[in-house]
């Protein structure tokens, strides 16, 4: 693939050097849309030239699959007529996604370039909340009435299907525009022409509400084998459709944002290499400062047990072991629950089930690692370390690990539920945040256990 791309780049560079626009257009027209996108990625300075050269249909298909920073860079360099043509030919859902990323004054200039009907449509779609299904939908679909025959429906599809986003699914509405059902096109094609559409309806309708969050649409598509889903208002009137390609795009963005937040950073608005160093600092600094302040409490806890540490310096040896074990366990639990929430496997109502499972698994994991800690101290004792108090010390480490790991499991699992309940993104209960929280509380558990067990001996 890489060699093929190198060849494409070399050939297009030769054609650009020769300055023959007709040959460039012919060459680009013979490439796949994805190959033109690759060329724009490899030769960003010629992105606008490629879009300007392509026929409008192919230009639209290339433009709609580019990431926003590239789209914005290209649109600034295009001629006025090409911008007008491109904006008017973009599918409504792709146009809405593009407008959503632009500054308000730029959107106003773009909308002026559109005919009145399309302008009204664009403003309607932009009127829905930013992360709602309404922003993803397109009003380009084919709908028929239930009293149509299959023959009439096919005539209707031939007449209006060309401008539809997809004709894999045909929608049935009543005279008021209320959605009644959806029918796969194959069922219509395979039926005799005299069959009534009403006879093909099975009333197993799955629809989205325009104000539903986009995450809900992702989950519904994931659970149902659909290429498109209808979108309605609160009264059930059909407004448009959402296609699986748009949902996959949003799912990828959601996944990327979640991974970045779980790493202890704000989500990047652009690809990593397109973000300036200053922007990277702005995205990462707030969380790092929060986590750094959290570590102050770790120092405070250690200072609070200074007398115990002076009396038994050996306790300090096991601090990294205790804190890292608790932090790792909490991060594990947090990642598992966040992923389960994203997949729709776990909801807020499941918090107590998750609590019980983590209580059991955290206890078992704590016993396993606590036993390993005990064996480690016993092994070193055989070589003369830790003296006569080795058994008590092993109990401190073993019991502390059980407590810290159990606590880490519960904190890591419950924090995403708390954030979701407060309306925040569970992904912000990132691994570093959980680790810092468990570090502080883990030290309290460790020193408390040490004080109880070692009192009268080392302490």
Image: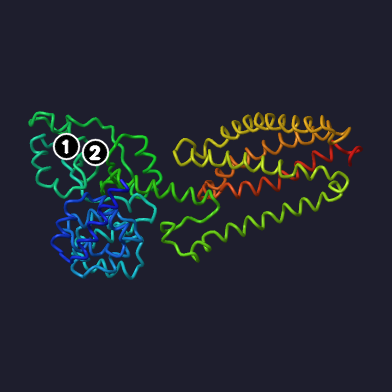
- Residue drawn 50% across and 49% down? 425
Q: Residues within 10 Å of mark 2 (few under 14, many from 20)?
A: many
Q: Which residue is mark 2?
A: 180
Q: Position of residue 445 (x, y in %)?
A: 75, 41
Q: Position of residue 262 (x, y in %)?
A: 53, 48
Work out whether mark 1 precedes mark 2 in sequence or the reverse, and give the earlier one.
1
Q: Position of residue 217 (x, y in %)?
A: 36, 43
Q: Nearer the viewer, residue 144 or 400?
A: 400
The answer to whether 47 is drawn above or below residue 182 in the figure is below
Left or right of 31: which side holds 290?
right
- Residue drawn 61% across and 33% down? 358
Q: Which residue is mark 1?
A: 146
Provide the secondary structure element on which disc 1 rests: loop
The answer to whether 407 is drawn above or below residue 84 in the figure is above
Provide the secondary structure element on which disc 2 rests: strand
Q: CA distance from mark 1 to mark 2?
A: 8 Å
């Amino acid at each position: 693939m890489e060699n093929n791309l190198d060849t494409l780049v070399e050939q297009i560079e030769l054609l650009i050097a020769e300055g023959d626009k007709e040959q460039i257009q012919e060459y680009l027209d013979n490439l796949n849309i994805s190959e033109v996108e690759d060329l724009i990625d490899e030769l960003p300075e010629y992105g606008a030239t490629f879009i300007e050269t392509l026929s409008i249909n192919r230009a639209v298909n290339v433009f709609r699959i580019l990431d926003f920073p590239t789209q914005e860079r290209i649109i600034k360099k295009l001629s006025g007529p090409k911008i007008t043509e491109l904006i008017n030919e973009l599918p409504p859902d792709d146009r809405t996604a593009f407008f959503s990323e632009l500054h308000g004054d730029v959107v106003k200039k773009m909308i002026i370039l559109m005919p009145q009907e399309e302008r009204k449509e664009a403003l309607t779609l932009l009127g829905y909340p930013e992360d709602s299904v309404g922003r993803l939908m397109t009003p380009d679909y084919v709908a028929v009435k239930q009293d149509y025959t299959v023959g009439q429906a096919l005539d209707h599809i031939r007449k209006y299907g060309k401008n539809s986003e997809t004709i894999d699914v045909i929608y049935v509405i009543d005279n008021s525009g209320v959605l009644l059902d959806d029918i796969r096109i194959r069922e219509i094609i395979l039926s005799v022409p005299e069959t009534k559409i009403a006879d093909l309806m099975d009333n197993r309708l799955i629809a989205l509400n325009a104000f539903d969050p986009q995450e809900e649409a992702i989950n519904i598509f994931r659970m149902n084998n659909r290429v498109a889903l209808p979108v309605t208002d609160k009264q059930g009137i059909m407004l448009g459709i959402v296609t699986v390609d748009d949902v996959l795009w949003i799912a990828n963005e959601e996944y990327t944002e979640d991974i970045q937040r779980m790493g202890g950073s704000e989500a990047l608005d652009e690809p990593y290499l397109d973000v300036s160093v200053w922007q990277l600092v702005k995205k990462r600094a707030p969380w790092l400062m929060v986590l750094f302040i959290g570590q102050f409490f770790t120092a405070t806890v250690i200072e609070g047990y200074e007398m115990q540490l002076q009396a038994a310096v050996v306790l300090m040896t096991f601090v990294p072991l205790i804190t890292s074990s608790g932090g790792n366990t909490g991060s594990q639990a947090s990642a598992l629950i966040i992923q389960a929430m994203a997949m729709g496997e776990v909801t807020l109502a499941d918090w107590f089930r998750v609590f019980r499972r983590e209580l059991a698994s955290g206890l078992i994991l704590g016993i396993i690692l606590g036993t390993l800690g005990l064996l480690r101290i016993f092994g070193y004792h055989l070589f003369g370390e830790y003296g006569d108090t080795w058994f008590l010390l092993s109990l401190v480490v073993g019991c502390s690990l059980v407590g810290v790991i159990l606590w880490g499991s519960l904190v890591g699992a419950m924090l995403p539920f708390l954030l979701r309940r407060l309306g925040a993104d569970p992904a912000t209960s990132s691994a570093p945040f959980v680790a810092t929280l468990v570090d502080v509380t883990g030290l309290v558990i460790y020193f408390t256990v040490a004080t109880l067990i070692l009192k009268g001996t080392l302490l």
